Image (cartoon, helix red, strand yellow):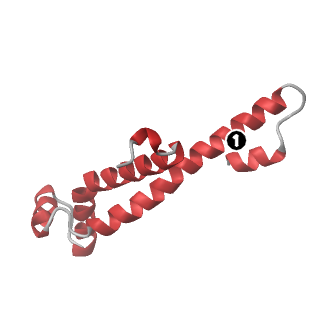
Amino acid sequence: PPRLADVPNSVRHVLASAASGAVGVTTLAPLEVMRVNMMISGRGWSLRRAFASLEGGWYRGNSADVLAAAIRVGITMPAFATYKRLLQRASEEGASSSPPPEWTVLAAG
């Protein structure tokens, strides 16, 4: 089996980011189920009704959310790290002689 040290850093970053997104969505799944059930019911908000809405399942429909979050965060976090590194490198190169290139302003926003 491959050792963690043998896996490229970029792959480890993507996998760690995907796991982070999946854990976050799974942690908040019961609150999301309550929110959706309360929106659908059309009745007023009450803590008792909110917890009663969980009787059908705390993690109902969670697998689709976990998959979506894992993909989204698995792409977003490494992309952010890459952009940050590129912008830092560009600002270090431009700091000595001239203002930063215009594309760095667009990429930062």
Q: Residue furthest right?
A: 97
Q: Residue furthest top?
A: 96
Q: Using the image as rendered, state which of residue 11 and residue 101 is in the foreground.
A: 11
Examine the image and state in which quarter residue 53 appears. bottom left
User: In the figure, 59 relative to 8: above or below?
Assistant: below
Q: Position of residue 13 (x, y in %)?
A: 48, 45
Q: Position of residue 87 (x, y in %)?
A: 71, 40
Name the residue nearer the viewer: 102 or 6. 6
Please name the residue shown 85% across and 25% down the image.
96
Q: Position of residue 19 (x, y in %)?
A: 36, 51
Q: Which one is nearer the viewer's eye here, 104 or 8?
A: 8
In percent of the image, x 12 and y 70: which residue is there? 56
Against 94, is 109 above or below?
below
The residue at 73%/35% (across/down) is: 89
Horizontal side of 71 relative to 108 (left or right) equals: left
Image coordinates for residue 10, horizontal then vertical, percent: 53, 46
Q: In this rendering, would 96 be left or right of 58?
A: right
Quarter of the figure with residue 58? bottom left
Say which element carries label 1: helix
Q: Mark 1: few, some, or many residues within 10 Å (few <14, many ≥20)?
A: some
- Residue nearest the observer in this picture, 67 or 1: 1
Q: Which residue is mark 1?
A: 86
Left or right: where does residue 87 sit relative to residue 2? right
Left or right: 56 with respect to 35? left
The kind of residue on which mark 1 rests is: Leu
